[in-house]
Image (cartoon, rainbow, N blue to C red):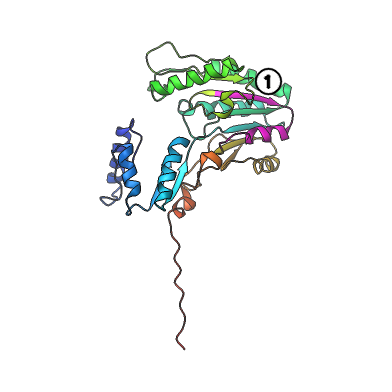
Amino acid sequence: MKHAPNVPQCALAFARLFEEAGVPAGAYTNLFCSVEQVGGLIDDFRVRGVALTGSDRAGISVGERAGRNLKKVILELGSSDPALILPGAPLDYAAEQVVMGRTFNSGQGCVNIKRVIVVGKDRGEQMLVNLKERFAAIKVGDPTDEATNIGPVVSERALETLVKQIDAATAAGAQVVFGGKRVDRPGFFLEPTILTNITPDNPLFNQEAFGPVLSFYIVNSEEEAIKLANATKFGLGSYVFDADIKHAQEVAAQIDTGMVYINTCFMDAPETPFGGVKNSGFGRELSELGIGEFLNHKLIKVSEIA
């Protein structure tokens, strides 16, 4: 396992957990190595499969190298996860879930809600007011303080990227209806942010904002909502909110993502498969399907001697 270079202590903690659990020595190994050294590992014939969680740029590089070496590869990459608020969805409940789904872990999650798409102008306006009130109640601060709702993003570079995305979006016509600025305190803190009026030619329309930045859309019909949900190069997770579960399932079947969550913001578990489609990658992690990605099925056929 090669972790991201900015989390070596997390890598060591994983190793301690394996050791404390009694896993045989060598079953789990941390690789503290450079990108160039990782390339050498992928080239090594003894390595028969590669799994990556990262950006689509990293996925292209790793996938290409694994392909040249005829090795299995699983890629879990970027996302722009939409939440569809259908006409039958209770708005207060949906708003509560959206806030949790967008701000969990300071908005830095593969399947955090990134976009909200509300069907109906009146309901959309109500939902926006609801979300703004809830965002205003969020406390940004010290993550060790139990009263804090949002801590810092992972690095200064990550914060600068988010601020640049917001500035570029507003320069292209988007409107910041809440937040949008760096918090005036030491550390890498961003105000929880909501943007509207994001047109297809806006750069944010096709980007992943990996932090507490929510894109908000209002559409006139369910068909428009599905079309907008699918109008992205990404396809990791998505969300559907509706009191009619059967109908929500019918809508979920039309969304081009690897996972759809109905009436909840998170339901991941070790026994459920995790992965996406399109530029969000391919293959599955977790569950029996995740293990199966690295299994080679072998046929032994026996014929009786006459």
**Which quadrant of the view contains residue 188?**
top left
Q: Residue furthest bottom?
A: 306
Is 184 displayed left or right of 136 in the figure?
Answer: left
Compared with 245, 188 (above or below) is above
Which quadrant of the figure contains the N terminus? Answer: top left
**Which quadrant of the view contains residue 63?**
top left
Residue 128 is inside the magenta segment: no
Q: Which residues are magenta?
A: 214-234
Residue 151 is situated, as x and y percent measured from the top left of the image, at 42, 22
Any part of residue 113 in sight = yes
- Residue type, label 1: Gln
Residue 111 is situated, as x and y percent measured from the top left of the image, at 52, 35
Is 27 displayed left or right of 119 in the figure?
Answer: left
Residue 221 is inside the magenta segment: yes
Compared with 4, 246 (above or below) is below
Q: Residue furthest front?
A: 68
How crowded pointer 1 is (Cα within 10 Å; few <14, some 14-19, many 20+) is rated as: some
Q: Residue furthest top?
A: 184
Along the line of sight, which residue is nearer the eye, 224 or 233? 233
Any part of residue 55 in sight = no
Is 282 displayed left or right of 11 in the figure?
Answer: right
**Which quadrant of the view contains residue 217?**
top right
User: Which residue corresponds to the image point at 42% horizontal and 40% vertical from the top-left?
Assistant: 61
Residue 71 is situated, as x and y percent measured from the top left of the image, at 41, 52
Q: Secondary structure at mark 1?
A: helix
Along the line of sight, which residue is nearer the eye, 235 or 137? 235
Compared with 234, 139 (above or below) is above
Residue 284 is situated, as x and y percent measured from the top left of the image, at 49, 47
Q: Which residue is mark 1?
A: 126
User: Which residue corresponds to the image point at 35% horizontal and 37% vertical from the top-left?
Assistant: 3
